[in-house]
Image (cartoon, rainbow, N blue to C red):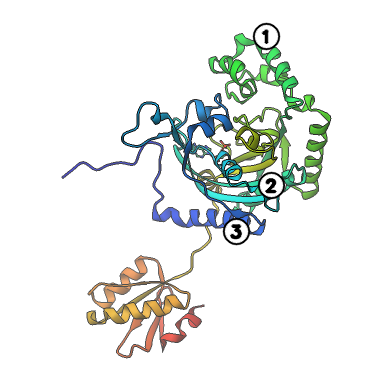
Amino acid sequence: MSRPISAPRGTRDLLPEDGAAWNHAEAIARDLSHRYAFDRIETPLFERTELFARGLGEASDAVEKEMFRVSGPTASEEERAEWALRPEPTAGIIRAFVEHGMYVRPGPLRVWMLGPMFRYDRPQAGRYRQFTQWDVEVIGDPGPMVDAEVIELGHRYFAELGLTDVVAYLNSIGDATCRPGYRAALVEYLAARQDRLTDDSRRRLRTNPLRVLDDKDLDPEVAAGAPRSVDHLCDACRAHFDTVRGLLDGLGVRYELDHRLVRGLDYYTRTTFEFFVAGRRGQQQALGGGGRYDGLAELLGGRPTPGIGFGIGIDRSVLAAAEQGVEAAVEAPLVAVVSSEAGELGLRLAAAATLRAAGLRVRADGSTRKLGKQLESAAKLGARWAVIIGDDPGTVILRDLDEHTQRELPLSEVAAAIG
Ligand code: AMP
């Protein structure tokens, strides 16, 4: 016997018993995308590495440490660095926006996507090398109304999923006018405290100083005394942020300010946010996050176009729902089609097709076992009803497998009798 093969490290199989919870989490995402008037977009699972390097920043973790390279069988050393699996969706979506000249469409453009992302990170609970994100983007609207709208949408997602106690943490990191000043103040402050920084942070101080605030091992005193971006906002960024907050207050969205929330990617400007279950801050705990990226289209060779969006992690949302004991939406009751005669396989299949056409969820027993065994296995499979085919294919016995009662009726009336 040959050796069994296991799934790659950091990946997970979605097993049938997980399906209902995932269906529920994805169905809400699709439904909300629809209700909030977003249109679907799909971009490739892999793109040019340069797209991520330019969009996310060379010094971002996603690019520096976590790129999953892909290449063809005959790729040269150079070509092997050319493509990477997408670590996040926004860069690809803005690439598509620029490539297809979508500026000319009546805007702002509102798009959503649901699919796998890949980061070659150290796997642990809640952190996988392949994970699924629901992503929404509004492109072409400088805000601030749309900032509040997008944050409210994320908040609503968790509420409809059944999670309680989800908080949006909020910050503004300024724009090209005021961020350089903030950056300089932060560098000055941190440089004077280099001895209290981790090696990673000392390096980031040169490459991407805002990211030092992201460092989970940052000395709490250093963190508490660090200059805050909100104190360095220019008038326009300040007005924008105040309006976003006022709108969120008006909507009753639960949010808290977090001055360390800089997000890890270069493309963010102004509003940044992340969702957590209250009190569950930690690297693997964020349920979703996003922000405004007014400079991204230009970085990717397009015309200046503002944008804002979020990515919500479906894996972690499903985990959080399970932890909070949220019951996944009940799938429709199962109907099993059985009969006593093996020769009636064709009739079973035809009856199943009729019932399915009427909207029922049906599996037909294809075995030659005795009727009693078929009914037993129907119950084990979780069927609520059995439809037993007798001599006359137009008339069946509908058996309630929970109540152990049954009655005879025309096949055509089964759906109504169950519904
Ligand atoms: P990020 O862009 O890193 O903030 O990612 C957005 C959301 O995707 C996070 O809040 C997580 O819910 C989810 N996520 C990010 N990275 C991973 C990962 N490695 N494994 C599972 N979920 C992830």
Q: Helix, strand, or loop for circle 1? A: loop
Number of labels in the image equals 3
Q: Check whether the beta carbons of the residues at disc 1 and disc 3 lie within 8 A of each other.
A: no
> In the rendered structure, which amino acid carries the disc numbered 1?
Ala
Q: Earlier in the sequence, mark 3 or mark 2?
A: 3
> Does the rendering let one see residue 327?
no
Determine which residue is flagged by label 3.
Answer: 31
Determine which residue is flagged by label 2.
Answer: 150
Residue 369 lies, in percent from the top left, at 23, 74
Determine which residue is flagged by label 1.
Answer: 192
Residue 15 lies, in percent from the top left, at 39, 52
Residue, x 60% and y 31% (percent of image)?
265
> In the rendered structure, which amino acid carries the disc numbered 3?
Asp
Q: Check whether the beta carbons of the residues at disc 1 and disc 2 lie within 8 A of each other.
A: no
Q: Residues within 10 Å of mark 3 (few under 14, many from 20)?
A: few
141 relative position to 211: left or right: right
Name which quarter of the figure residue 400 lies in: bottom left
> In the rendered structure, which amino acid carries the disc numbered 2?
Val
Residue, x 35% and y 38% (percent of image)?
8
Q: Earlier in the sequence, mark 1 or mark 3?
A: 3
**Quadrant where the image shows the N terminus:** top left
295 relative position to 384: left or right: right
Residue, x 84% and y 30% (percent of image)?
235
164 relative position to 314: left or right: right
Given residues 69 and 263, the one toward you in this image is: 69
Name which quarter of the figure residue 208 lies in: top right
